[in-house]
Amino acid sequence: MNDRKKQTLKTYFGFDAFRPGQEEIIDHILAGRDVLAVMPTGAGKSLCYQLPALLMPGITVVVSPLISLMMDQVKALNEAGVHAAYINSSLTENQMAKALELAKTGQYRIIYVAPERLETPRFLDFACHAELSMVTVDEAHCISQWGQDFRPSYVRILDFIRQLPVRPVVSAFTATATERVREDILTSLSLEKPYETVTGFDRENLYFEVKRTREKKLRVRKYLEDHREESGIIYCATRKNVDELYLYLENEGFSVGRYHAGMGAEARKVSQEDFIYDRIKVMIATNAFGMGIDKSDVRYVLHYNMPQSMENYYQEAGRAGRDGEPAECILYYSPQDTVINRLLLESKEHSREYTEEETERIQAQDMERLRRMEAYCLTSKCLRSCILEYFGESSIEKCGNCSNCLEEFEEVDVSEAAADVVRCVGVSGQRFGSAMIAGILLGENTAKIRNYRLEQSPVYGRQSSMGQAMLREVIRTMTERGYLWQTPDRYAVLKLTDLSEELLEPGASFVISCKKKEDRPSAAGKRKSAQLQDLTERGKELFEELRKLRAALAGKRKVPPYVVASDRTLREMCIRIPLTKEEMLEVHGMGQKKLEQYGEPFLEKIQTVTKGDRASWGAVPRAEADDTLSGKDFSGGFPEDGKASPLTDGKSRGRKAEFCLTEEIRSGIRYVPEISLSEFAAQINDLRDASAMKRLTVKWLTEKLTEQGCFQVQIQNGYARTVLTDRGANAGFRAERRISAKGHPYEVFFCTEAGQRFLVEMMEQIL
């Protein structure tokens, strides 16, 4: 079975190896076990049910929420040589009848179906008389009322399964599910002794940034100017914002389209196809667009407005970089975003099936999600850590691949302002929210303040010189640290806590972190074409030629360009310079079926452009290319084998070399009684030549310490957690247990002086 599995992976999907977590899921499905898998967008969820569907004897039914998702998946499968079909409202009754007749004869191995179609007499009759090996529920979070995309039709999937004469394997997949949503999925689908896995929410190839600005149009325009040749999505909170931004950018000469629910069905379809087929570069849309869109070469996702929840944000941002190549996720935030989203949530209609109590509970949860999203936009912590902690996953303190980790912050003493906030909340009777408290302290002359006669308050105008943005940041940080409490209802009133009085004591200190330059250029603006950073200038020239060929081949076959070949596949061609069919098969994504369809024209183009001269075009020998391509670390650390690669030799190619422990760095290390692992890595990074050498990453150190037996990876409640071993404690390491904002435990690792010397010796041996 293992040989068949690997052969199927290469033949139909073009991959030589599975991504983390995929093979375990596939093995459990093939063993006949139910599965619930939470995998981040781009981690390869679809392969986890598509590959076993080809190895199991009967038909796999995939329940999918959107027509566009089904059409994309089926088109890609058929291009790969897998016969698949879909059943949804885009087909006529005759077309559906024909598709089901062909399925009965064994024509299709996989059938995608909309949840509303499951219990129609025709489909139910087909399902009861066909051999169904598996029912897969994609986007499974739609089954939970606590999820961000609840769909009542998903609740009836279990009724469909129970009507089948023989219960098939049931598998459920989603990218964004909190613990509560996962419990809902298990119950609502009645999964039997399922294999549960959370492969991790982290997407290392994604760069995250929050840009606080009121000049959003100008910021977006500047970003698009720097990324004209790349494909991207811009999300807006309202249809009005979509239309206004679309007209503005179109007038500025950008290749843009738009998508929102206020457009006609045909207009939305045309716009979506224009984007998928690369007839336009940028899609401007509300959250009505994108669920299940399998366009793998989206290089950036910009949020023109703050989303209503972290679930929405991470799902939308996750549409960038699905091919595993570097991509950017930038959120342009202003306080008005919170106001708009609050109004949208307050006017949101809820199902009549809910009781009044349930509706109030859902509304309160929506408001809490909005507050958590706002906190993300305002935090000075590592953005990736904030995301992972929200979903209950432990993370390092600094990822090195977000704006907060790359920006410079300074400590600002705001003790006086914090004390005044406590006084203001107290004298105003703990009846108001943060906006009102800030207004009183700033001395604003509003009708509400006058109505309550708060202009007579002893703290009125006491912080008029601070500025609204800074004062709101003080209040937010006080709430985050427990000096204030915000009620969970829609009006979010500030209350004092047991800690509040501490800020009124003589000598009390309250310090917050602020960016040194509030309006500095986006860090992402300096990261143009990150996916091509390991290509020579001639390699980039070849990449553009291959991209043009891909577009032409896609046009002839009437499929999206990414179905022909992903950006990663093209980039590997530029690195390897394959000149034979055998060499082309070594390229990621080029399986036997793809080779038969597209191998010849790609080989001809490479031969024509390079004249077969690999050396002058910077081709890398096979073994070296494999090392580089498999060990790519987007946070700027080591390849997987810990060795430097010719592709990252800064002297020969003009790029940074991999980190190495030089004598200068070694002699500059200062050992202290105790330091966190991330701070120790930061100290070493400060000693290197940052312009010529990549960073040492905590991820690499953690992996090597795990190999040394100092750390151990354990599965706890479905999560993979790194824990300290006795060997690690004896070597000088200490673990400090902390609790994430969602109440989940994680470890922060510290090293004594002995531990620091152990790390240096370990690096000397490996490097």
Image (cartoon, rainbow, N blue to C red):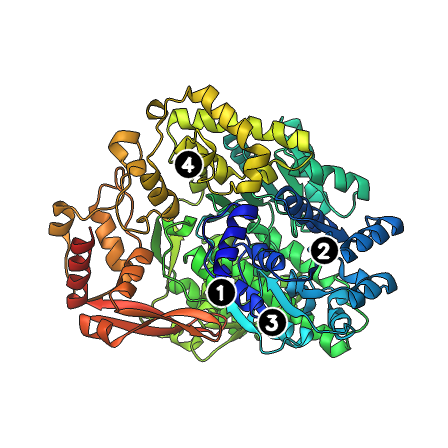
**Residue 611 screen position, x and y as percent:** 42, 19
Look at discs 1 and 4 and give the one toward the viewer: 1
Q: Earlier in the sequence, mark 2 or mark 3?
A: 3
Q: Amino acid at mark 2?
A: Tyr
Callout 1–callout 2 Cβ contact below 8 Å? no
Q: Earlier in the sequence, mark 3 or mark 4?
A: 3
The front one of 379 and 269 is 269
- Cα separation, mark 2 vs mark 4, equals 42 Å
**Residue beneath the point at 49% across and 44% down:** 328
**Residue beneath the point at 66% across and 63% down:** 136
Q: Which mark is residue 112?
A: 2
Whether residue 456 is visible, yes or no, is: no
Q: Earlier in the sequence, mark 1 or mark 2?
A: 1
Q: Which residue is mark 4?
A: 526
- Cα separation, mark 1 vs mark 2, equals 24 Å
Callout 2–callout 3 Cβ contact below 8 Å? no
Q: Amino acid at mark 3?
A: Asp
**Residue beneath the point at 68% across and 44% down:** 75
Q: Amino acid at mark 4?
A: Lys
Look at discs 3 and 4 and give the one toward the viewer: 3
